[in-house]
Image (cartoon, rainbow, N blue to C red):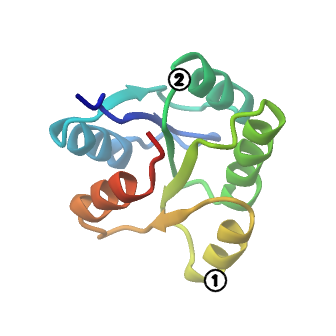
Amino acid sequence: MERPIRVLVAKPGLDGHDRGAKVIARALRDAGMEVIYTGLRQTPEQIVSAAIQEDVDCVAMSILSGAHNTLLPKVVEQLKAEGADDILVIGGGVIPQDDIPFLKENGIKEIFTPGTPTQVTIDFIKANVNL
């Protein structure tokens, strides 16, 4: 029997709004995934440490603060430095369309903007996680 996909839902940076992160965390749980939610105001180092400790398959970061071009690639860089670059990294939140190509070039596999149905995110994770 296959084990459930393990997803770390994280809020990098200083924004204090986590409704979207909680919505996606609940949707992933309802889809049968194990979800670890790190809470607000996480540094890239904290996110990477939690991802490795929890042995997750995916890191899903929600960001609204505008620091996405700095913080999201830092998480990817640090995962690589720790030898954990097999972890799928995705992002979501208020991210301008013009910034998405840069994020994808820097290791974020997909970006989910406001209005994306949760099922789209669920399907993407299921299709792209290496179990």
How many circles with numbers are drawn on the protein? Answer: 2
Above or below, 37 against 19 in this view is above
In the rendered image, residue 20, in percent from the top left (x then y), is placed at 34, 49
Disc 2 residue type?
Answer: Asp
State if disc 1 and disc 2 touch (CB < 8 Å): no
Q: Residue at x 84, y 36 (%)?
A: 81
**SS at mark 1?**
helix
- Label 2 sits on residue: 55
In three-dimensional space, the C-alpha distance between marks 2 and 1, rounded to whole angstroms, equals 32 Å
Q: Nearer the viewer, residue 31 or 67?
A: 31
The C terminus appears in which quarter of the rendering?
A: top left
What is the quadrant of residue 75 in the picture?
A: top right
- Viewer-nearest of labels 2 and 1? 2
The amino acid type of the residue labelled 1 equals Asp
Q: Foreground: 52 or 100?
A: 52
Q: Dot 1: few (<14), some (14–19), or many (≥20) neighbours within 10 Å?
A: few
Image position of 58 (left or right of 21)? right
Where does residue 32 sit, x and y in percent of width and height?
20, 36
Q: Give the farthest residue toward the left.
A: 30
Pick the quarter of the image with the N terminus. Answer: top left
Query: Secondary structure beneath disc 2?
Result: loop
Residue 105: % across, % down: 73, 70
Q: Is residue 54 left or right of residue 81?
A: left
Image point (60%, 54%), residue name: 65
Q: Residue at x 30, y 47 (%)?
A: 24
| Residue situated furthest top in the rendering | 53
Mark number for residue 98? 1
Determine whether 106 is above or below 31 in the image. below
Earlier in the chain: of badge 2 and badge 1, it is 2
Looking at the image, which residue sits at the far right?
A: 81
Rendered position, 42 above or below 107 = above
Q: Indicate left or right for 95 with 105 as reference.
A: left
